[in-house]
Amino acid sequence: MRESGTTDPVRRLATVLALADSRLPVGGHVHSGGVEEAVASGSVRDVATVELYLHRRIRTTGLVTASLAAAVCAGDLDQVRAEAEADARTPAPAARAASRAQGRGLARLARQLWPQQDWSQLGATPHLSTVFGVVGGAAALTPPEIAGVVVYTTLTGAATAAQRLLALDPAAIAGCTIRLADICDQVAAQAVIGLAALSDPLQDAFAERHVRREMPLFAS
């Protein structure tokens, strides 16, 4: 069932983009997308390396998450199987926990916006990709649209964390995100072709190291 509080497609997309804002109580603001550990390891240290990291994250985590969300939105993947597919594509336990924590936050807010939607299959801690897919259906978005939202979120969440952690010029980080816009569009288009099956060992390692760090600034 695809329903929304408005029939205006621009407003529907804007609503979901607003949900993806890390400032909302979804909890995205407390997750760095691996950037905190990348900074601690010296892999990310300036604007140039931030951009490289963002590019890598979009091409891997962004693609996988967007492909799962798009499949759920299209009705090609039910919520139960979507959870299993997300687990299979997220080998690091810490990364799975981060995905489920953010999924829980998004679902909590989305239930209030679309009470007519059936949320019963999500469970208490669903993956972020599954929730985005259900949200896309509830908001009457197309699979390419929800894929674009997911890729955008993957980019901006990590970019904001990098700017905060390294005290970089916000304008310089904004420049990174603008330069990566075409890559985001390409990845979103690729995501709707079929389920992506890949992982990034470096990001998995960062996720596992992060949970062992004393007094981290970010949850992941």
Image (cartoon, rainbow, N blue to C red):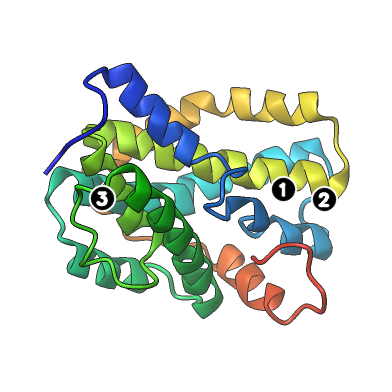
Q: Kindly report the distance in space between the C-alpha atoms of the residues bearing marks 1 and 3.
A: 27 Å
Q: Earlier in the sequence, mark 1 or mark 3?
A: 3
Q: CA distance from mark 3 to mark 2?
A: 32 Å
**SS class, disc 1:** helix
Residue 134's label in the rendered image is: 3
Which residue occupies the foreground of this view, 169 or 218?
Answer: 218
Report crowding for label 1: few under 14, some 14 to 19, many 20 or more residues within 10 A (C-alpha).
many
Residue 171 sits above or below residue 83 on the image? above
Q: Residue furthest right?
A: 167
- Helix, strand or loop at disc 2? helix
Q: Is any part of residue 67 visible from this angle?
A: no
Residue marked by disc 2:
165
Position above or below: 158 against 17: below
Amino acid bearing label 2:
Leu
Q: Are marks 1 and 2 in contact (CB under 8 Å)?
A: yes
| Residue 28 at x, y percent in the picture | 58, 52
What x and y, as percent, mark residue 27?
57, 55
SS of the residue at dot 3?
Answer: helix
Q: CA distance from mark 1 to mark 2?
A: 6 Å
On-image quarter of the N terminus: top left
- Give the residue at x 74% y 31%: 173
Residue 156 visible in this rendered orientation of the protein: yes
Pointer 1: what residue? 161
How dense is the environment of label 2, judged by Cα within 10 Å: few (below 14), some, or many (20 and up)? Answer: some
Q: Is residue 127 left or right of residue 18?
A: left
